[in-house]
Amino acid sequence: MIKFFKNIRKTFLVEGKTTNYLKYAIGEIVLVVIGILIALQINNWNEERILKIEEKSIVKNLHNEFLQNKKIIQKSIEDSDNCIHILKSLMDFMGKDEELINKHNVDSLLFYAFDPPIFRPSENTISGLIQSGRLELLQNPDLVDLIYEWGRTMKALNDHSGRLLINIDNVVQPYLSKHYSLKDIDVYGDLNWKNKTILEIDKLKIFEAIEFENITDDFIYRVNECNKRLMELETIINKILKETEQ
């Protein structure tokens, strides 16, 4: 083809047809430009097609990931509600007669009251998007906003959960270790003691102490704050699932 065009140009020059040669040269330039534009358009179309395929894959992965997270968070909210309910039961024992308190399994209540759930969702897809800078592939602005909202709310929850765990280590556990039997509580945990402590200790005295009432009240507040963030995240999850439906 190139040889063919060269022969035409040569013919025009030999015959002295300068005007025709100029017209032909311009036409050849136009054809080359058109060819380049078509090639670029095809290349752009191909790139857009690849990006669309990648975006579709990301959206699908997000949907599947948050289907898992929905199950996890529903269990976490349920466990958190139970934790708050048990903590309030302990508050109801404050100042009450031992006969009334002894009708309940206080060891078990203490184990579950001060063992709140920690929400650990799957975030592989979101983390990959942010770290690789591919979040811009998502053409749905509402979905992008939800992903950022998820990140902010997760940070708030992690902050509350972190302080809650510190409170257990620095406040709850030290108090109970002085005024209660940790072994009796751990009967219901992984240690699974077969026998309770044989040491003499008046465990129910904690329900006559304002310090334990304050510790319990403060713990309820902290767990409740975590629970609020969990419910916010559940709402975000439902919105993300709606935006990622294929």
Image: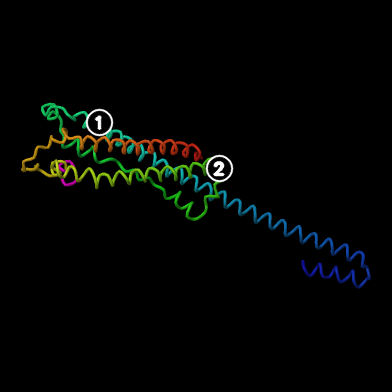
Name the N-terminal-most of marks 2 and 1.
1
Q: Work out whether 95 lies above or below 200.
A: above
Q: Quadrant of residue 179?
A: top left
Q: Work out whether 246 lies above or below 9.
A: above
Report the magenta residues as a range. Answer: 186-191
Colour scheme: rainbow
Mark 2 crowdedness (10 Å alpha carbons): few <14, some 14-19, many ≥20:
few
Q: Quadrant of residue 159?
A: top left
Give the structural element (helix, strand or loop) at label 1: helix
Q: Pick whichever, 227 or 97, lies toward us.
A: 97
Residue lying at the far bottom in this picture: please name it.
14
Between the C-alphas of marks 2 and 1, the distance is 43 Å
The x and y percentages for residue 221 are 31, 36
Q: Residue at x 84, y 70 (%)?
A: 7
Q: Mark 2 points at which residue?
A: 141
Residue 190 is covered by the magenta coloring:
yes
Q: Which residue is drawn at 82% across and 70% down?
A: 6
Residue lying at the far right in this picture: please name it.
16
Q: Quadrant of residue 153?
A: top left
Q: Which mark is residue 88?
A: 1
Q: Which mark is residue 163?
A: none
Q: Pick whichever, 23 or 55, lies toward us.
A: 55
Residue 86 is covered by the magenta coloring:
no
- In the rendered view, does 67 fall on the left or right side of 110? right
The x and y percentages for residue 130 are 48, 52
Q: Work out whether 46 lies above or below 151.
A: below
Whether residues under marks 2 and 1 lie with C-beta atoms below 8 angstroms apart, the answer is no
Name the residue type under label 1: Lys
The x and y percentages for residue 33 are 76, 60
Main structural element of the magenta stretch: helix, strand or loop?
Answer: loop
Give the structural element (helix, strand or loop) at label 2: helix
